[in-house]
Amino acid sequence: MSWPWSQLGLPGPADLPEVRHAYAEKLKTTHPEDDPEGFQRLHSAYQLASRMARQRKRQAGGRPPESQAERPVPPPRPPEEREGFDFDRLLEDKEEDPCRPHSGDEDQNFDFDRLLQEEESPSHPPETEEQDFDFERLFAEGETERAEARRRRGEERRRAERQQFQERQRQWTRREEQMNLQFRQEERWQGTETILHAIEMMYNAQAETEVWQRFFMSPLFQQHKGSLDLIFGLEDFVSAKNLSQEVRLALFMAYGFDKGVARPELRPLYQMLRPAWREAGREKNRERSIVILGVALGLVLPFLLGPLLDWGLIPAFGVSLGLVWIIWVVRKVVITGNIGRNVSKKQERRSIIKGTACVLGLVLLMSWARSKPELDWRNLLPAGDPREQTCRYIEKDFGVKVGSLYNLSETYADEAHDNIFYLEGDPTNKRFLAGPDGERDITHGKRGYTTNLPEMLLLWELKEFARAHKMEPVNSLDQDMEPWETNGTFLIVLPISEGEEIISDLGELMDELRQEKWYKALATRCELVLCSEEMEEGRVVLIRIQPGLTVYSAAQCLDVYEETFAHSCCAQILKELELDRDFLGDGEERYSLTNEGMAQMKGDKCVKLYGLNEEGAVAMEYYINPKLRNIYCVPGNFWETGNAEEQIGFYRLLYWGDRGTFNLFYPWLRVD
């Protein structure tokens, strides 16, 4: 298939009606504004196909076209052939494209058949030419003029079609607006009929006030309440029906007449409903006066009825106000038939039940509060100061009353005392640290504050225990700290001997403290250490426990104390006094000290240790009396060789640094 027939969708050369029909079909899918280039190609194909169809028709009829009847025939020239057509004669045809806009109805499509009607322009008058006329130049100039004419006609046609399309769109828009306006008018009228019909049905069914209120506040009524038809219909309905004051008031509020009349056409309806609004205002003022009178009576009633004051002032006020409220409910039910003019019977019964339950609950609450004299009602109010809130949290968690040193007086109102708190009753000696720490959430372990109060409470108890038993101070490791600080390690210094009573009394104290609420909050870093007095190389530790995790066992401590504590302390003393060797000679060999229990020496109960040499033989025997600070040393074979205690006498005085002296005893005579 060759061009232009392929552009028109034709299988091959066709007659002029078929060409026009094919062109019309193609125009339906090729619009000049959507595809200008495609439209130009289609129109050029149509023009060429039309000329070729006319050429074929003239050749078939055997008569020349009228436009060339009086024109002299030019000299014979070899014709250019393209598909068997005479292009010289074909190019002499000139057609006029349709330019006039379509004037059909705006809601119809383009009249493509009419668009295809073309008028053939008359041929140019023949020109007399000389014998040597340049036909090729004339042919080229004619082709250029025809191309320019086709371009102008195409632009004019596209402009006309664009104007026609815009005009058609405007007409469609105007028609759509008219249809929408008509639809809205019909919709408003249908909504008005529906509303008036619903109002009539509710009136005949004697619907409750709350039903009328819900209907007047529904989207349907609110959407159409500005319609003049509905306003006139409501005027007729209100004037013809005997509506209750509640229904009139609900309609009054639905139109917002309490804020004034916005439109003049609403004024007649406003005048009809205004008496109901005035009556509601008077009723509201009466109820307000009755409520004020009832509250005043409830406040005076406890002083008129003496037994109420026995419950306390606050419970008495609660009960009296509850009784007044019950009387007000009974009055509304008995006299007016309902609690409020705008509530249903079901709501009335529900309100009475709830009110009675509230009064009974109030009475029970006041009775319980009366049975709790320690309950502080101030804690029910929110705290304005975070320190005050921290005090409330601490009192609730630990069961002790505390205060903020910062708020105690202006003397401590500085940054140095910002987080220092104290126990009530002793703000001078019993102070501790505390401060707010985020939100309080007990379920997730967040107290809302941080404090060392549990550790300080334990420290204060142990200090009292040490003073009562005339022991060294417990806070010996806290020398560089403030009185309200602690490192959490508490030292109980035990004597080397005769410390059983202290261990037993400490067990009783710990059993008592375990019953305290604050004791359960002890941190795991808190540690209790039972040890000896401080020596040059540290202390001898009897036992370590964490009160927050481990239960102190006095029996276990006594067993360890009696078996090993005294011997460990005495062995440490011998090492620090350098007696764990041949102290009479120049020997540097240290003896291994072993626990040999207890023994008598010169009538005193002493701690017995052996000093073993490298061969494991007993090189020295030690008998130590910690209370008298006596140390008895005898050679390992002293008793086997027949020696006796009378031979052991005072040898010299030993200085133990700044911790005092020891008396060293050694035998003077040696027996072979």
Image (cartoon, rainbow, N blue to C red):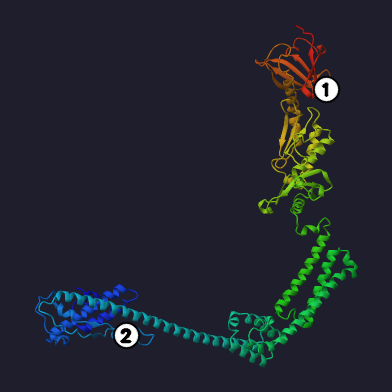
Quarter of the image where one finds residue 159:
bottom left
- Dot 2 falls on a residue whose secondary structure is loop
Residue closer to the observer: 292 or 104: 104
> Can residue 8 be seen here?
no
Position of residue 399 relative to residue 229, above or below, is above
In the image, what residue occupies the spot 88% across and 65% down?
Answer: 309
Farthest residue in the top direction?
672
Residue beneath disc 1: 628
Is the residue marked by circle 1 packed among few (<14), some (14-19), or many (20+) residues within 10 Å?
few
The spot of residue 358 in percent (x, y) is: 76, 69
Residue closer to the observer: 321 or 29: 29
Residue beneath disc 2: 100
> Can residue 406 be seen here?
yes
- Dot 1 falls on a residue whose secondary structure is loop
**What's the amino acid at mark 1?**
Leu
In the picture provided, is 312 more to the left or to the right than 122? right
Nearer-N-terminus badge (1/2): 2
State the count of labels: 2
The spot of residue 73 in percent (x, y) is: 11, 83
C-alpha separation, residue under disc 1 versus residue under disc 2:
141 Å
Quarter of the image where one finds residue 207:
bottom right
In the picture provided, is 399 more to the left or to the right than 51? right
The spot of residue 513 in percent (x, y) is: 78, 43
Badge 1 vs badge 2, beta-carbon distance below 8 Å: no
**What's the amino acid at mark 2?**
Arg
